[in-house]
């Protein structure tokens, strides 16, 4: 019997049936946790995990809560639960919330260029069942990784940005993505996205920058790090905004380098950090563990 | 004007007025969070932070929750709140709880021998206001650190275990400690405590072991690490039980060593980890962030 | 034009022409560095890097030196240089040495079972030119990874140890390996090798153990780590000896875990450390950076 | 018998008799190691450790070598050895060297302001024998730490920069330091030194900056880090040049922070990194392990 290499050792991601995540965010006040959990209890939901954070508990600052709960026949009950939460939270509180059925994986498109380490690492983690997403497609301005991506059973779409020009390429990207993805990951995609594209796409975009931001913003961060003589290099996963490398940081990490490391050595060490940091950020985003707040993030990891 | 070195740059530890911690622990079931937060809301308490963990949410395993809340006139209201919690949690649930006024620092005695790095680090952190405890005394089987301890404004008591013999020394320890301390820290105290002493003392004891447990149990862990040729050495803070180095682990960390490190180098590198790990464990314990569960700990750090 | 996925983004490993490594090891005494570098200078060699270590410089302990040098027409000159070194080092010193042309990659066979994370990571790194070796074959007691390995252009050989029995399987292994490889890597190969096999194979074997040795020797280390409640889990790359998990340690690292991590989470976190630690050990061994000394290693990383 | 707290548990730093360090630095060429080691051997010196680095071995770049050797009657022989090295290295090579008797500790002045964590850590480590220096004095623009410093047996000199004005204060600093110290450590000294002062002082100055440079240059780096929402904060030890926070980096490290950390928490976590990083830099400088090269450092740690 022929084995299909794309699925031979694929494990389905853990997408627990009848589990939902509830993110509540807004102005802090007395009784939010009680009100939310009373609504959940009232529907027979069992709280599986609850993380809460208030940025200034003494003076009524901002409030953030992530709750994961299990509930029989979740899909049937969700609309009623959503209505009750809306009633409760709009009545006495100044709060927004999002409720999501966790058994439905988020759909993601991964953008890559020539470098394959972040891309392959995501595909491979997904195959092992460690990323609860559906990778709908890989988009690249180069063809180097096409066959390898397809060997994972994932569609590969080549959009030659140089030939098409930036404007036509972005139009093609929008055509591919809109309605098809819940977020986008730039896995060392070496093209800058226009503010217009980001706005029109309308879903979160996660980028991996190969420096410990805000050090070494812009291109060539490893060369700049070598030039400056730093003793650690890092990587930063962040949400993309119109301001290059200035978006909310999701995760960062570093690795030690020495005077003896060549630029190639630094790139090699840095690549290990990049893929790890990006994978964490993608997993956390997939599991609703990251809440954006102005230009920062609350991460319930 | 003469400055008192003991208090010249002392900062009072942050002990928030009108804040309490509530630890709930027991068998998981639906509605615990709602029930607890309803009682708190009913008394007008505002939840400042809430951490919750269930070890097997799908099958009714163990449940752990740490809640910090603020409440006007806490001290006056606490007894009534405690009664209501007891009623609520004993009625429908199989749960234990402890409620503590966080404005009252826990009282701790620190035991040390000749090595001063962990002891001085605790005294210094305490003076900077980073450890919300009252250090009631330092007890040592040597006199080396006496004047330095007293310069921090902390009583130093010499109990010469060799001269007294173990049994008399432990009796003296019990006489000093019982009723006077809420927990004990062994800051590189190089004497083994008897099971009888631990039982009769009746308060938690935190020890720092200079290895990454369970590697290198017993004496001389750095020499054993050098002998085995490990590339990292570590330290472990744990609650003391009758079984040497087998108690519940609170915190661990490691540091890199190489073939070129002598035993003195390893001790020096390890000492930095020891003091950091012990300080974390003591702070977490002081803030009710550590819940013991069989031979493990839940740490809401 | 059809692209070959096995080589589409393959980079040749950096194998510098006309560079050699010289490892000198033995009893320390005055003048070794001078004697060795005089022989090298006499042949016109330029020392590119030199690392030296004496384990007890004050009392004539052991001496270790790694020198990398460049020399025009290295291949032609090497025999004469080797003779001169032998004369010099056998005359006045009690030293062994090995001299190796670094433009010739070491040949390695990788053994794997079902888990693919260490195996794929080595294949990826090799394709990127980061491991200066020739991967002559992958040997496995399972067929899960066959197609993926072959997509890298590397032969995959299935040796079904269960069906054959241990003795016949080891005979088959010896038939495949002897004369064909310079070292063997066990990339989460879940079979224990007999002392007889190790002896008859006669080349170094590197294993990755999924714990911070000497903690959790033997099988199921992650389950044991969860049971013991440790706050860090680790991985250890070591040379294989007859004593299971007792061989000389090459490299170790750890990652933080918490009470909330399930066994699956711990395995996932640990897998990232395993592949990183193994890759470092393999690269260092490939570049002659690891010197075995009794049950320890000197690593000039 | 009265114990003197300043010396009760003081250990003399390890300053090996008859050991010298030799730093060679300049243009790379064939035969340097051989030439240097031949001169050393010729005087009967035994090389204890040798580290060498060439920044571009293939094209005649820069060469750096640190050698530690032992030699009987070192003090008597040193002048002749220095002459021979000068002859040898000036003849065929384009190299500078410095030779130093390691049994003579470097003299250091430590500058501090109100924060005591870096200062005390250096004093503790020195007392434990872990810093091979003589701390000749502590200079501060505040008096907070005076008694504590003097309890270590170290002179404390108050130079009130605000009252005196910058120019008069720097003149006083020069009067205190010139001829008396081999280097200066700024242990969280919160005053900017003028370029003129740095030039006239004429000895290296090591500063600890409380960020992972080049991120967050200038004042208030922790507040900037909190504002930017980074997930790690760090510290950087560097040589002071006229350009604020731009000098050659000696050592850096980082620690993880989260959204839940207040500015006070970040400062507390950062302080632990600051004191560790500074202590490493001071020890390495004391042992001649740091070579400056343009705006970078070669660190043979």
Image (tube, coloured by chain):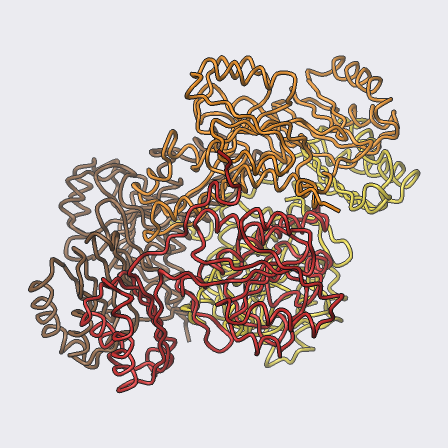
Chain colours: A orange, B yellow, C red, D brown
- Along the line of sight, which residue is nearer the eye, B72 or B84? B84
Residue depicted at x 70% and y 23%: A24
Question: Residue A96 at what x, y percent from top left?
Answer: 68, 18
Question: Residue D230 at what x, y percent from top left?
Answer: 49, 34
In the displayed structure, D43 sits above or below D204; it is: below
Residue most extreme to the front: C1
Query: Quadrant of the rendered structure where residue D281 is?
Result: bottom left
Q: Is residue B181 visible?
A: no
Left or right: where A41 falls relative to C222: right
Question: Residue A290 at what x, y percent from top left?
Answer: 62, 30
Question: Disc count in the image?
Answer: 0
Q: Quadrant of the C terminus of chain A?
A: top right
In the displayed structure, D167 sits above or below A182; it is: below
Question: Residue D50 at what x, y percent from top left?
Answer: 28, 67
In the displayed structure, B276 sits above or below C60; it is: above
Residue most extreme to the bottom: C91
Residue depicted at x 40% and y 55%: D121
């Amino acid at each position: 019997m022929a084995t299909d290499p794309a699925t031979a050792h694929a494990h389905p991601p853990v997408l627990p049936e009848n589990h939902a995540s509830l993110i509540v965010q807004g102005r802090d006040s007395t009784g939010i946790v009680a009100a939310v959990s009373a609504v959940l209890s009232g529907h027979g939901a069992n709280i599986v995990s609850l993380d809460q954070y208030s940025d200034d508990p003494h003076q009524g600052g901002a409030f953030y809560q992530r709750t994961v709960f299990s509930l029989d026949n979740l899909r049937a009950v969700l609309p009623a639960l959503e209505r009750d939460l809306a009633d409760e939270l709009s009545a006495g509180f100044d709060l927004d919330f999002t409720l999501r059925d966790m058994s439905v994986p988020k759909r993601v498109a991964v953008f890559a260029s020539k470098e394959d380490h972040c891309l392959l690492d995501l595909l491979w983690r997904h195959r092992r069942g460690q990323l609860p997403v559906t990778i709908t497609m890989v988009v690249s301005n180069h063809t180097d990784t096409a066959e390898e991506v397809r060997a994972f059973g994932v569609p590969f779409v080549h959009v030659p940005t140089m030939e098409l020009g930036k404007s036509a390429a972005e139009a093609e990207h929008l055509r591919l993505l809109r309605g098809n993805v819940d977020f986008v990951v730039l896995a060392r995609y070496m093209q800058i996205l226009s503010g217009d594209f980001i706005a029109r796409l309308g879903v979160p975009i996660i980028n991996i920058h190969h420096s410990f931001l805000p050090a070494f913003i812009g291109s060539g961060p490893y060369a700049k790090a070598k030039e400056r003589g730093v003793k650690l290099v890092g990587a930063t996963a962040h949400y993309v905004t119109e301001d290059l490398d200035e978006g909310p940081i999701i995760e960062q990490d570093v690795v030690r380098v020495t005077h003896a490391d060549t630029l190639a050595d630094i790139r090699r060490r840095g690549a290990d950090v990049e893929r790890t940091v990006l994978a964490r950020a993608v997993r956390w985003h997939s599991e609703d563990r990251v809440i954006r707040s102005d230009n920062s993030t609350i991460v319930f990891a």
